[in-house]
């Protein structure tokens, strides 16, 4: 099963068409934000730029607020994607 998950790469025209179809601008922006967000860049920048102890709090608050805004945007994107009826409507 693991060999199937990580092997079997074929670059046929059908598979490449699916890849190019999935590369939307929102996906690319999300990918870039995720890569930079997963790296410890914000704490390192806060340590390098901020000299006094009391100036670290705004950087932390900004990080929390940015994460919260991205969470809300993701939830709005998922909820407005398609119509999902109530799952137990027919029962």
Image (cartoon, rainbow, N blue to C red):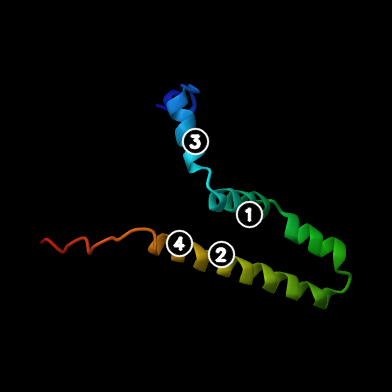
Q: Earlier in the sequence, mark 2 or mark 4?
A: 2
Q: Secondary structure at mark 1?
A: helix
Q: Tell me if mark 2 has few (under 14), some (14-19) or many (20+) residues whose alpha carbon lies within 10 angstroms of its own.
A: some
Q: Which residue is mark 4?
A: 77
Q: Which residue is mark 3?
A: 19
Residue 9 or 53: which is nearer the viewer?
9
Q: Earlier in the sequence, mark 1 or mark 2?
A: 1
**Can you see residue 5?**
no
Of tags 4 and 1, the one toward the viewer is 4
**Between marks 2 and 3, how big is the CA–CA gap?**
24 Å
* 11, above or below 58, in the image: above
Quadrant housing residue 91? bottom left
Look at the numbered discs 2 and 3 and tell me whether their residues touch, using CB distance below 8 Å: no
Look at the numbered discs 1 and 2 and tell me whether their residues touch, using CB distance below 8 Å: yes
**Can you see residue 34?**
yes
Q: Residue at x 74, y 55 (%)?
A: 41
**Between marks 3 and 1, how big is the CA–CA gap?**
20 Å
**Between marks 2 and 4, how big is the CA–CA gap?**
10 Å
Q: Secondary structure at mark 3?
A: helix
* 51, above or below 35, in the image: below
Q: Quadrant of the N terminus?
A: top left
**Between marks 1 and 2, how big is the CA–CA gap?**
10 Å
Q: Earlier in the sequence, mark 3 or mark 1?
A: 3
**Residue 70, labelled with which disc?**
2
């Amino acid at each position: 099963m693991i060999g199937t998950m990580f092997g079997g790469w074929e670059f046929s025209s059908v598979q490449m068409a699916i890849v190019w179809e999935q590369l939307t601008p929102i996906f690319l922006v999300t990918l870039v934000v995720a890569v930079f967000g997963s790296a410890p860049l914000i704490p390192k920048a806060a340590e390098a730029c901020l000299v006094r102890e009391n100036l670290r709090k705004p950087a932390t608050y900004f990080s929390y607020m940015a994460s919260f805004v991205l969470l809300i945007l993701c939830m709005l994107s998922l909820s407005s994607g398609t119509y999902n009826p109530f799952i137990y409507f027919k029962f």
